Image (tube, helix red, strand yellow):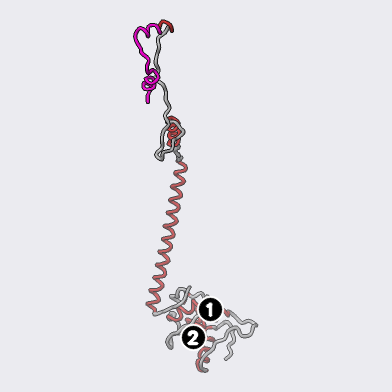
Amino acid sequence: MDAYDIFKKLSKGVKFSKSNNRILSKKAGQTVKLEPLKVEVDSVSINGDISSQNPTEQNSTQNSSDNNITILSSSNIGNVNKAKKRKHGEESEMQCQRKKKLLEIEKINHYRNVEGISVVGKNVPEPAYTFDHFKIDADILENLKKCGYEDPTPIQKQAVPIMLEEQQILACAPTGSGKTAAFLVPIIQQLRGPQKQGFRSVILCPTRELAKQTQRECVRLSEGRNLRYIL
């Protein structure tokens, strides 16, 4: 409904003529001007609820909500980029470490397969490649060379590192593979020298002949340490 319709309803039954207009204008001393009326029409929402705001208020609130723009400064953008780069760098470094670890494990397993070494268990130390890789004193290394050992045998490569870390071990190897030296070297390394503490190590052998052989090997490998052996 516009201003013309409202005026038409209000002036229903009234007759207008030129003479009436002249008289009214003379009495009022001025012409009559008709201005359009402002009619506020409530807007209806989709759910059928009548909103209490007029269109201008709704437009203003909508414009204010639309104008809420978050502006990031160059420093904030730089910090975000730095954080992303740092995170990417850490992830790439972790991936590199994982690859290196996998390559090391693969290399160790390949070496064990070549030497015919089979291990079962967790946290098994890496096998030694030479006598120099054993973490033992120089006098024991010299005694090994005097006894005719040039390179460690497969049982010695794996058993000695395990016993030097004081881990329990159950080993099996053929006759003449160097099993005696494999368990004697770690024992002599840990005993170091004589002490007044009684028996510090006990070795059990199934036969007397094997016990004598073990004693002779102990004397040769521990030369210069003044250790006592009782059969």
* Relative side of 17 to 231, left or right: left
- What residue is shown at x 52% (from left), y 83% (from top)? 184
Which type of secondary structure does the marked residue at label 1 adopt?
helix
* Relative side of 15 to 216, left or right: left
Q: Give the quadrant of residue 191.
A: bottom right
| Residue 150 shows in this picture | no
What span is in magenta?
Answer: 1-24
Where is mark 2, residue-wise? 180
| Residue 201 shows in this picture | yes
Residue 195: image location, x then y, percent:
63, 81
Q: Amino acid at mark 1?
A: Asp
Q: Amino acid at mark 2?
A: Thr
Where is mark 1, residue-wise? 139
Residue 132: image location, x then y, percent:
47, 75
211 and 223: which one is in front?
211
Q: Give the quadrant of residue 9.
A: top left
Asked if residue 144 is positioned above or below residue 3 in the image, the reply reads below
* Magenta region, main secondary structure: helix
Asked if residue 34 is positioned above or below residue 151 in the image, the reply reads above
Tell me the distance, in whole angstroms, between the alpha carbons under discs 1 and 2.
Answer: 18 Å
Q: Residues within 10 Å of mark 1 (few under 14, many from 20)?
A: some
